Amino acid sequence: MVKKLITQDTRMFLTGNEVIAYAANAAQAEFMYGYPITPQNEIMHTWCKLLPKTEAGFLQTEDEISAGFSTIGGILAGKRAFTATAGPGNVIMQDAQSMAEMMRIPFVCAVMQRGGPSTATVIYAQQETRLTCFGGNGEGFRIVYSTAGHQDLYDYMIKSFNTAWKYRFPTFMLADGYQGKMREPVTLYDPASRGITMEPTPAALRAPGVIGVDREATHLRNTFNLEEELMERLDQYQVDYDAMSKEVEEYFEYKADDAEVLIIAHGIVARSAMTAVDELRAKGIKAGLFRPITIRPLAVEPLRNVVKRAKEILFTESANGQLAQMCLEKMYGLTTPYQTLFKMGVGVTGDDIVNKVESMVKKMASV
Amino acid sequence: MARTKIVLAGEGGQGVQSIAKILVEAGYEAGKEILYIPNFGVEQRGGVSVAFCQIADEKIGEPRFAKGDIIIALSDRAIQRCATYTSADSVVVYDSSVCATKPCVPCKDVIAVEANKIANEKLSARVFNIMILGVLLKATNVLKLDDIKNAMEIALGKKFDAKPELRELNYKALEMGMAMIDKVGV
């Protein structure tokens, strides 16, 4: 049993990477596997710095391929294990992540997005949105929470473990280099104080009891002989995924009820959008925000409802429309026009959004 | 809502992130809302290092802002890099004993300080960044000197205890930095 560091509400001034390490401990995570890559290194550093107090475990592997598979190994042994990565590391961890999808392993990973493609920048982006949702050679049977600041990092890191172990789909907390490196105040708490109980983490391999006498054999497959065998399995996964979706979908609306211009943004960009909404409202422009918190699965009904009510939509991202593509597919049949503000690998400021929405409103008025 | 947006930029190794950390720690301890993003490339030394700091009375939304209220540039490359963060309302401070060029950007005011030269001649090159922190403290006028001293204890207390003269040296640098700005809260 690991030792919990946070036993009462504690206000701290931390970087996001530090927050994630504290959150994993609060969730009673027992083991972290990882390989260094900026901007997520300090998750590992902090986790390791706390080890003498937490009595948890850590293994630095030879690369992200190994980190991903080692995490799976720890989980199969019944450990609440996790990993974290970013950028090219996220790319080469896809093999293990696909295996976790196929074998329904409660894999937990924090992704701190950096610029892409390839090495690009070590700073920030939202360019791993599609990769984190749909990477690997599969169908994206994954759950992805997109966070917007330090309180989110703490809340959703804890939640990711429970979601993964409850539904047995790999679960990701998608953040970015800004959130990892920036410092802002955050309240750390013991999950029990919020009525959160951690899901049990039974071992899949080497479970107690004699096979055939005390228990069935655990048969985790990632290889199939026949096409139909595979499809039968995946069809069932889809049924499970759809059933689970209604329970895990999360979204956040800000002044969206009467919004004429609706901004759709996720993660830290949604924070800039909130600043912009307030400024626009002060100028008499009815702007609002829809922020999907689970970007996979998306909260489709709420999204469609709010889009239907708006006169015009603005998608904004630090990527070239990776979230917009996912949303547009789910918005099929709706006729609300949309515009875009995409800055590939660069932060979107409140001013950027204000200027764009003002130009949209001007055009709407002149039509 | 009172929100001060600060851009602090210099060469990697000049101590830009170190003083940004002290500044935001001081703000946090003084009960302000804070958001600080360090921004740099893959180099261990060299390259432009930028700190985006926000100090506010209410909760801060956007992590990255478009235009700063105060921009401090400590090298020629930093001046170039920061041109995009200035507006007609910005005040730009630069170190004329380091930079060969004067910032030529749309802004309210340009202030030259000679912190590097004065630190070298009168104190020590090592407290150049603390002198800049003094400049920043007076120019922004949202935090008190005691807040900064308190945060310096948190960051450097152990070193100060081992060598008490370092505390005096750093305090002196802070005061000399503050003296370089004529008007409080430019």
Image (spheres, coloured by chain):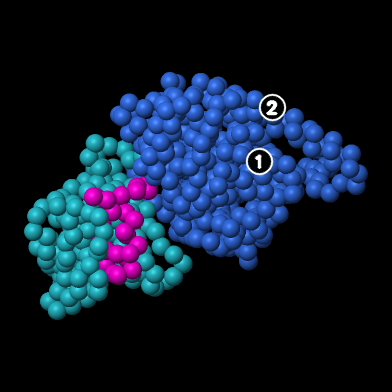
Q: Position of residue A84 (x, y in %)?
A: 56, 53
Amino acid found under the numbered disc labelled 2: Ala
- Residue at point 37% right, 57% down? B38
The question of residue B66 being in magenta is answered with yes
The answer to if A179 sits in the magenta stretch is: no
Q: Is residue A165 visible?
A: yes
Residue A69 position, x and y percent, is 68, 55
* Residue closest to the eye, A33 or B129: B129
Query: Chain A colour?
Result: blue
Residue visible at 57% across and 38% down?
Answer: A324
| Residue B185 or residue B102, whichever sits in front | B102
**Near-viewer residue (A93 or A352):** A352
Report whether B159 appears left or right of A66: left
Disc nearer the start of the sequence (2/1) = 1
Point out the residue furthest to the front here.
A366
Direction from residue A175 to residue B133 in the image, left or right: left
Under mark 1, the amino acid is Arg
Q: Given the current orientation, which residue lies at the most extreme bottom position?
A: B121
For image coordinates 40% across by 31% down, the residue present is A362
Chain containing the residue with disc 2: A
Q: Say whether mark 1 and mark 2 are on the same chain.
A: yes
| Residue ID for mark 2 | A243
- Write down the residue under mark 1: A142
The segment highlighted magenta reads: B63-88
On the image, the x and y values in percent for residue A276 come to 37, 36
Q: Residue at x 22, y 58 (%)?
A: B92
Judged from the image, the secondary structure of the residue bearing numbered disc 2 is helix
Q: CA distance from mark 2 to mark 1?
A: 13 Å
Label 1 crowd (10 A; few <14 / some 14-19 / many >=20): many
Q: Is residue B129 above or below residue B149?
A: below
Q: Quadrant of residue B76?
A: bottom left
Chain identifier, colour cyan = B
